Image: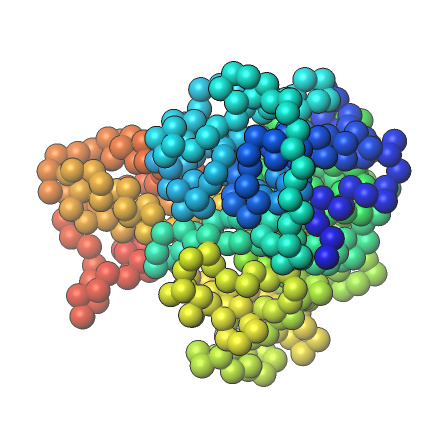
Amino acid sequence: MPLISSILQNHPEDRAAIIVPDGPTVTYGHLKREVDRVAGLLAGAGVEPGRPVSIVLGNDVEFMTTFLAVAQAGAVAAPLNPAYTAAEFEFFMQDADSQLALLPPSQHASREAANKLGIKTADAWLDGTTVKISVAGTELTATGTPTPPRADATALFLHTSGTTSRPKGVPLTHGNLLASLRNISETYRLDESDVAMVVMPLFHVHGLIGVALSTLFSGGTIVLPPRFSASTFWPTQRQTGATWYSGVPTIHKILLDKADADGAPEKSFRFIRSCSAPMSPVAIAAVEARFGAPFLEAYGMTEASHQMSSNPLPPGDRRPGTVGAGTGVGVSIRDESGNAVPAGQQGEVCVSGPNVTHGYANNPEANATAFWGEWFRTGDQGVLTPDGYLTLTGRLKELINRAGEKISPLEVDEALLGHPAVAEAVSFAVPDPMYGECVHAAVVLSGEATEDEIKAFCAQKLASFKVPDSIYIAEELPRTATGKIQRRHVAAKFAG
């Protein structure tokens, strides 16, 4: 079975693989040589095959190079959000059993966490178009021979938030990733003429698999700005001739709201893709009309190596309000006993295919309920039409979906309850016009504390996007007749 790094092969060496706005352009030939070289450096530094390497880098050449090099060296790439707190880094690195952390050459919360856990750290930075790596201030030069991974070896290790436990580790094999890249490439007919703007973070499957790797798989070019910026988006699109981008509704809405002021063209991309959160049919029509490009809603999740379904390109039938049909992935609606239900009947969305993870890492309890035979249970509720179009109708799991970032309410509850004056705490999702959903919480106090003080306390424990936007201080929380607290009742009482 080919490795994920094989996506760089069989493309002209002088073709642009990565364009950094106001920065270097990296060709396929150069990127492949860099990946080979860095994989050798990692092997020479003692990186063991089969074990994770945490990558805490931004949307840059260093990330793409080290990600592919780690996988080629037989180790497991484990990207992490650079915005995490030290406590979050500590949890994720420890849970993954990381052997090494690749970090930017500066003081960072990830370095503090790695040092506390006794995990070796290495600095990674770009010198021209060359990725340099140093350990303890000494640049690595000794090269080893990487151990080729097994055919079914894990290439990528990510975490997904759960509602009944701490975040779960999701191992994805080289085969999982390559199957997903093939599905995405075929869905959007990607080829060497495509130029994709990467506006989603590379530590997330949406940006990494849905855009960056799928474009390289098809021989196209990725444009890597350090972060999404509405003010530079259209000038970059014109300069690079970008043919598509994929984002969450928040990004599409920002671009739409600022379109006239920013001089957006009337005809822009070959297509615009949306994933990670729902977009209203009215907003979809507005984006298509203003930007002169078909808008394709897709459905993805980490456990399926991202994409599971999508609306098709023209002349296919785009149906706003749906997430399209399965894209090389089996999609089935099942009842509470795991039986398939007829078209038009609501149930749990389940998927199967070579892109789907074989199970969570070291979590037999979660795995015991995650599958019905070959079918992975997404925890989402939906309905299929007779011709296979999927409409999502809700989430069985209670994740809070803020602009595509899935937040576990239990994780937020835990942070709130860590405050010495908080006796009870329940967090929940509240609809938000910009982010889709935002985090609110209700607390019962046992001492003196203000809303701002509790927020500041949470900010020490949680990444900023997880900190509640509003905290309601209450005398008591609503309970059911059996004394249980249900999030939907709390949400209705305080934010309804």
Query: Could you say where residue 166 lies in the image, as x and y percent from the top left?
Result: 36, 52
Residue at image location 49% in from the left, 34% down from the top:
100
Look at the picture and state if 421 lies above or below 229: below
Query: Could you say where residue 85 lies in the image, as x and y percent from the top left?
Result: 39, 32
Look at the picture and state if 168 lies above or below 58: below
Residue 246: tell me if it is visible: no
Quadrant for the N terminus in the image:
bottom right
Image side of residue 428 versus residue 186, left or right: left
Color scheme of the displayed model: rainbow
Residue at image location 50% in from the left, 54% down from the top:
170
Residue at image location 75% in from the left, 46% down from the top:
6
Count of marks, rendered view: 0
Depth check, front residue: 157 or 490: 157
Query: Could you say where residue 298 lies in the image, as x and y percent from the top left?
Result: 65, 56
Quadrant for the C terminus in the image:
bottom left
Residue 189: tell me if it is visible: yes
Query: Could you say where residue 90 lies in the image, as x and y percent from the top left?
Result: 38, 37
Residue at image location 11% in from the left, 42% down from the top:
446
Image side of residue 12 versus residue 85, left or right: right
Image side of residue 370 versus residue 474, left or right: right
Depth check, front residue: 204 or 292: 204
Dividing the picture into quarters, in which one does residue 194 lie?
top right
Look at the picture and state if 237 lies above or below 2: above
Dividing the picture into quarters, in which one does residue 131 lie?
top right
Depth check, front residue: 261 or 412: 412
